[in-house]
Image: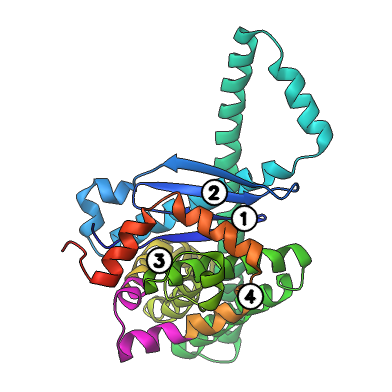
Amino acid sequence: MKRVSIGGQAVLEGIMMKGPESYSLAVRKEDGEIALEVHPYISFGERKKINRIPIARGIINFIESLYIGIKTLMASSEYYMDEEEEEENKGKEKKNKEKENKEKDDKEGDSKSFLIVSLLVSLAFAVGVFILLPSLLANLLYKVTDSDILVNTCEGLLRLAIFLGYVAIISMMKDIRRTFMYHGAEHKAINCLEAGDDLTPENVLKHTRFHKRCGTSFVFIVMFISIFVFMFIHTDTVWLRLLSRVLLIPVVAGLSYEVIRYAGQHNNRCSRILSAPGIWVQRLTTKEPDLSMAEVAVKAVEQVIDVNEYLNCVRNQSFET
C-alpha cells in the first residue's frame, strides 16, 4: 500500500473526508443515525502530469477543494430539510416513472447550476472581503507616505486582522461552534490514523485537534505569502492595483500549497516553524469534539481508505515507495 494523505472538511452536523479515489460524507441525522455517502472521485491533477508541476498542482487542488467542499456542505444541509419539504418530495416520487425521471434530470441540472453559482458567490465574497477590501484601505496610506513596502505590509496586516476578526466573530455562533467541533473531530481522526492507533471514537479523542495540512493553515499562509508577492507590484491606479491582486490569487494559492505540502510531509525544525502560525489560528477554527462527533469522523474515514491495511503499514513501516 502506498502512503496517502487524506483530508476533510467539517459540514453541517458531519464531516466530509477525501481519500485517494473517493470522498465520503458522514452526517449525524436528527434521529441520531449516521447517514453515509461515498462518491468516486480522482483528482484531475492525479490523472494528468500537471500534478507533478509545482504551483500548478496547488491551483488545481485549491479549486477542487472548493468544489467538493461546497458540494458536500450543500448535501449535508439536505438532511435537515423541513418535514413539509420531505413530504412534498415523497409525493413527487409517487408519480409516473417518465415524469419522475424528467424531474430528476431537471433537479440534477438545477443542483449543478446552483452549485456553480454558490461557488462563484463564495469566491466573490472571499476575494472582496479578504483581498480587495484590505487593498483599498491600505491604498489610502499613499496620502501620507510614498513607501510601497510600508503600504503593502500594512495591506497584509489588515488582511490578517480582517480574517482573524471574521473567524472570531462567527465562532460565537452556536451552529458554527458545533461545526468547529466537527472540524476538531476530523483532525483528531486523521491524527489517530497517521499515528497508527486503532481508529475508534475513544482513541480519536486522545489525539490533538490540530493538523499541519489544515485548510485554516492554508488560508493563513495565503495571506502571509500575499504580502511578499504583492510587494513587487506597483501602480498608481487604484483599479489596476485591485486587478493585480485578483490576477495573482492563483500564484499565491499555488505557492501556499507548496508550503503546506512541505510542512505536511516533513517533521523538522523548518516545517514546525512554517506550521506554527497556522496551528495557532486553528485554536479559533477547531474545538474539542464529543464522542458522538468522533464516531462520525471514524465512519467518514472508513469509507475512503482500508483502515486496517493502512494501520498495518504505519506500524510496520511497510508502505510502497
**Is disc 2 surrounded by few (<14), some (14 to 19) or many (20+) residues within 10 Å?**
many
Mark before the other along the chain sequence, 3 or 2: 2
Q: Are marks 3 and 2 in contact (CB under 8 Å)?
A: no
Query: Distance of mark 1 from mark 2, alpha carbons?
Result: 7 Å
Q: Which residue is mark 4?
A: 288
Residue 237 seen from this side: no
For this orientation, the residue located farthest to the left is 321
Of circles 1 and 3, the one toward us is 1
Q: Quadrant of residue 172?
A: bottom right
Q: Which residue is mark 3?
A: 253
Q: Main secondary structure of the magenta part?
A: helix
Region in magenta: 259-276
**Residue 265 lies within the magenta run:** yes
| Number of the label disc, if any, that sits on residue 14 | 1
Label 2: element kind: strand
Mark before the other along the chain sequence, 1 or 2: 1
Query: Distance of mark 1 from mark 3, alpha carbons?
Result: 27 Å
Mark before the other along the chain sequence, 4 or 1: 1
Q: Are marks 4 and 2 in contact (CB under 8 Å)?
A: no
Q: Are marks 1 and 2 in contact (CB under 8 Å)?
A: yes
Name the residue type under label 2.
Answer: Leu
Q: Which residue is mark 2?
A: 25
Query: Distance of mark 3 from mark 4, alpha carbons?
Result: 29 Å
